[in-house]
Structure formats: C-alpha cells, structure tokens
Amino acid sequence: MSDILEKIKAFSSEFNTKISPYFIKPEGYEKRVMEAMEYAVSNGGKRLRPFLMSETAKLFNVSQDKVFEAAISLEMLHSYSLVHDDLPAMDNDDFRRGKPSCHKAFDEATAILAGDGLLTYAFEVLVKSSYLNDVKVKLIELLSRGAGGYDGMVAGQMLDLYAENAKDEKNPLELISRIEEMKTGRLLQYAVEAGAVIGGATQEELTALRKYARGIGKAFQIADDILDVTGDEQKVGKTLRKDDKEDKLTFVSVCGLEKAKEMAFDLIKNAKEALAPFGAKAETLKDLADFIIERDY
Amino acid sequence: MSDILEKIKAFSSEFNTKISPYFIKPEGYEKRVMEAMEYAVSNGGKRLRPFLMSETAKLFNVSQDKVFEAAISLEMLHSYSLVHDDLPAMDNDDFRRGKPSCHKAFDEATAILAGDGLLTYAFEVLVKSSYLNDVKVKLIELLSRGAGGYDGMVAGQMLDLYAENAKDEKNPLELISRIEEMKTGRLLQYAVEAGAVIGGATQEELTALRKYARGIGKAFQIADDILDVTGDEQKVGKTLRKDDKEDKLTFVSVCGLEKAKEMAFDLIKNAKEALAPFGAKAETLKDLADFIIERDY
C-alpha cells in the first residue's frame, strides 16, 4: 500500500515536469487562457490516469518516456472535464482539490474557454506526438469516442445532470452504473487502451485490460461515493456530504454503505483476476486496484 | 452575384442532408446532448466554410463527395464555437440566426455539454473518415492548432473578451485585426487548407490559398461590422446595433464606415489576385470573395 503510493508520487512528480513545458504563453493578452489552462492542469491531482497508462504500457516493455505524450493529452482532456463540470451551470463547485476552481480563480468566461482550449490541445498533443501515424489515428479514435456525446464522457455528464431529478427512477442502480460507465469509466478505460495500443497488445490482452479498467473504474466511483460519506474534508480536498444535502443518487444512497463496500471489493477482486495473463509483470496494476478502494482521499 | 448565391444554396442543401445522419441518438436520457448538438448544427447557417473547402478542393479536381467528411467536421467545430460564444458568461446572445440560441432552446448546462460534444465529434469525424492516415493526421494537426488556445480560435475569443474593456487601447486597429485573425480567420483559413491537403496541393499553391483565405476572412469580419451598423435585423437574423450599445471596438467604430468599406474592398481585390495561379478554375472562389462584402445578411 505505501509502496504503491510512493510509486504514484514519484510518477506524478516526473509527469508534472513533463507537462509543464506545454504551456508556453503567447505575448498578448490572450495568454490569459493559457494561464487558466495551466492552472487547471496543475491542480495537485494524483495523475492516476497517466500512471495507469504508463503501468499498462510497461506490461509490453514500453519505456515510461514513450508514454508521456499520450498521458499528457489524456490529463488535458480530463482536466477540461473538471473545469467545465465545476462551472456554476453544471456542478457549481467553488473548490477543486482544496484550491479555487478555475472559474473562481479566473472568471466564468475564461474557464469555459480554458476547458475548450484543453480539449482541443489534447488532440493537438496527440497528433503532433512522436508516435507512428497508425498509432496516432488509433489513439485519437479511441479518445474522441470515449470523450464524446454519444456514449462517452459528455453523454455521461448529460445523464448525470438528468439523474439529479430522478429520485423516482425505477432502477436507480442501473442508472448510476450507466453514469459511472460513461462519465468516468470511459476515460479510465482509454488510459489502459492507450497503453496497450502504444505497447502493441493483442486483441486478447486488450480485452483483459479493458475488463480490469472497467472494474477499477466502477470501484473508483463507489469509493468516491463512500468517501463522500465517511471521508475527511481536509484530506479529500473538496466539499463533502454535498451529495447527501442534494439528495443525490449515489452508490451509497442507493445500495447502502455496507453493500457499496462489498461491491467495490468484488469489483477489485475481479479486476485483479483479469490481469492473470500478465503474471508478475502486473503487480503494480494490482496494487493500484487495491489502492483505489483503500485510499482515504 | 445571384449565381454564387444559387451555388451556395445548392451546396448547403446537399451538405445538410449529409450532416444529418451523424446525429443518431442513443436510447437513454443522455440523448438530450445529441439533440442539442444537432440543434446547434441545424441553425440555418450558410455553410460558408464547407463551401469554401469544397471549392478549394475542386481546384485540384477532387469530387465534392470526398470533401464532405472534413467539411462536416469543420462545421461541427464552428458550431461548437457559436454555442459557447452565445452563453450568458460569454456574449450572452439569446438568438442565433433568428432562432433561440442553444442555451435558450435547451439550458445552459446542456449547451456547455453540446459545445464540448461537437468539438470532440469534430475530431472523431475526421479520424474515422475515409481519408488516408497521412491526410487525417495533417488535417487534425491543422484543425487543432487553428482552433486552439495558443494562437487559434480560443485565443482569439480570449482576446475578444479583453477588448471589451480596452477602450483606451493605443492601437485599436491592430488589436481588432489580431482578434479577427485568430477568432474567425483561422477556421476560414483551415477551410482552404483542408481542401488543399485533400487535393494534394503544392507548397506554393497552399501559400496562395492561405493568402486568399486571410483576405476574405478579414473582409468578412469588416463586412459583419458594417452590417451591424447598416443591416436589416430581420435579414441578418440576429440582434444588431449591439456593438454600438456596448461601445465595442469594431472595424467601423475604429476606422469609420467609409474607411472600413474601402479596407474590405481592397482585401477582396488582393484575395482574388492571389488566386491568379489557378486561372479560370478559381472563378467560383472569386465570386465568393465578392459575395462576402456584397451580401446584406
């Protein structure tokens, strides 16, 4: 447990030095949007998605350096989603990991533009990366679908907004499972897909890794819902007990705390089993799975 | 003049039948975002950018059918920028071409997501298109840079927000020229670049076409500013005289009406001259240039 935390921290610190040069500012006043983009990306996040991508690529003996471009692109896309999600018209969150959210640190218009800029930049970074064209095309294909409005992240955000007024939903567990799958699951899945594509995985290996990603993705959301109830606001770095106040559908409100813990535990167990084909090489990914439900922030 | 209008209308009508199938709705409630995306794209626009791309590709004997995928991608990206630009925190426009803007027809959160979805979809359409991988990569490279936060469309929107409070700007003409270049010019330039890339243009041909695009782009903005002062609100389909009320820097407020007309005329003249290498093949592009400053809507 403490070992995996050390690994994540070491990775995250190297990742931060790699992403920083992407935010060169232009001369004119328009630089404000690049400043807001950088602010949004430098939010003290754990860089779980980049770490997940890197560890997946390692299964195929890909060096960490070769993964950074795709990982930076993904983190930009992830950060855009947080910036827009925090907007007053969306989740209306003034804080993100203990710091003012982008529209509070800058202003609403700048935050909208910063999100747009980060989303656009995510594709620019991929397309200008050093990967072969075939790899670039495959990555952009997976990322754009996974982040999109049909059954990707944007669709999940739309469904999440609906769920706010769905107290009488007949099958609330199915609803919140679909939200999780699209809203947060798809990008976590993309993290392993990208690592696998860069590593030249076979179809079977990709299937196994997707199963792992789906498991930890859902467990991650359940753990977040549990933390919202049991967590320490200082450690988690955001307003907790908000879901409760808003009478929101969550895995805890729908299934109860004990059942939610059990579900998360089973998901992690199955996720780790999916990694069997990779043997000892997948130890870190297994530790990461455990970390996801054992973390207290 | 009437001839070019007929051509644009015929193209636009075919374009609309081609873009419509891209908005297949999923089953669940998340379909709302796809509905908003379709609404935003079906806004009765003239489809100038797609037409420009198609006419550019025709210089290289590329059939209209081969251009549609890239043109649809560009129109999605253009539409996203309008949806976000109309938001209350941005330009706060309730109408777009005579119809309620996206956040009025739906709601603000849905409009934010619809814009995000369209921007993402623009890249998905390109990457899943039938072009060769080399062409896809080149197009995505040009589009992402042109739409981006460093010196692309998003940077232009940022600078435009700044200009609202820049009454005492020392060189206002330079400022609004830079805004135009980034905010609207880059995507118009991309339209010809994409047509040229699909057509396999030489570097010299690309340079000539970029010169043309820059000229008509700037003239287009000047014509818009003139229409804001002299236009018929019913025909133009949006609230006019808003710039004046807001004491906004425009080519007309900075240079005066006559000087602005003269500038637009000169830009169009030079833009047409840049097409000389293409001879008679470029007649429609020349007519389009004239249309841009002669239109009354």
Image (cartoon, coloured by chain):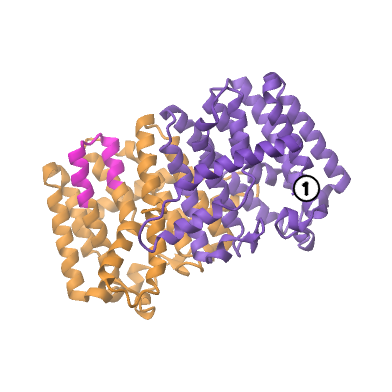
Chain colours: A orange, B purple
> Seen in the image, is B150 located left or right of residue A280?
right
Q: Residue at x 75, y 60 (%)?
A: B242
Name the magenta segment's main secondary structure.
helix
B93 part of magenta stretch:
no
The answer to whether B139 is drawn above or below residue B20 in the figure is above
Q: Residue at x 45, y 46 (%)?
A: B21
Give the quadrant of residue A230: bottom left
Whether residue B186 is visible to the viewer of this picture, yes or no, is no
Q: Residue at x 30, y 52 (%)?
A: A188
- x then y, percent, for residue B184: 65, 44
Q: Amino acid at mark 1?
A: Asp
A201 part of magenta stretch:
yes
Residue interval drawn in magenta: A191-212
- x then y, percent, for residue A79: 43, 55
- x then y, percent, for residue B126: 46, 38
Q: To which residue does mark 1 refer?
A: B296
Whether residue A4 is visible to the viewer of this picture, yes or no, is yes
- The residue carrying pointer 1 sits among few (fewer than 14), some (14 to 19) or many (20 or more) residues within 10 Å by Cα, namely some
Q: Residue at x 39, y 53 (%)?
A: A150
- x then y, percent, for residue B15: 55, 41
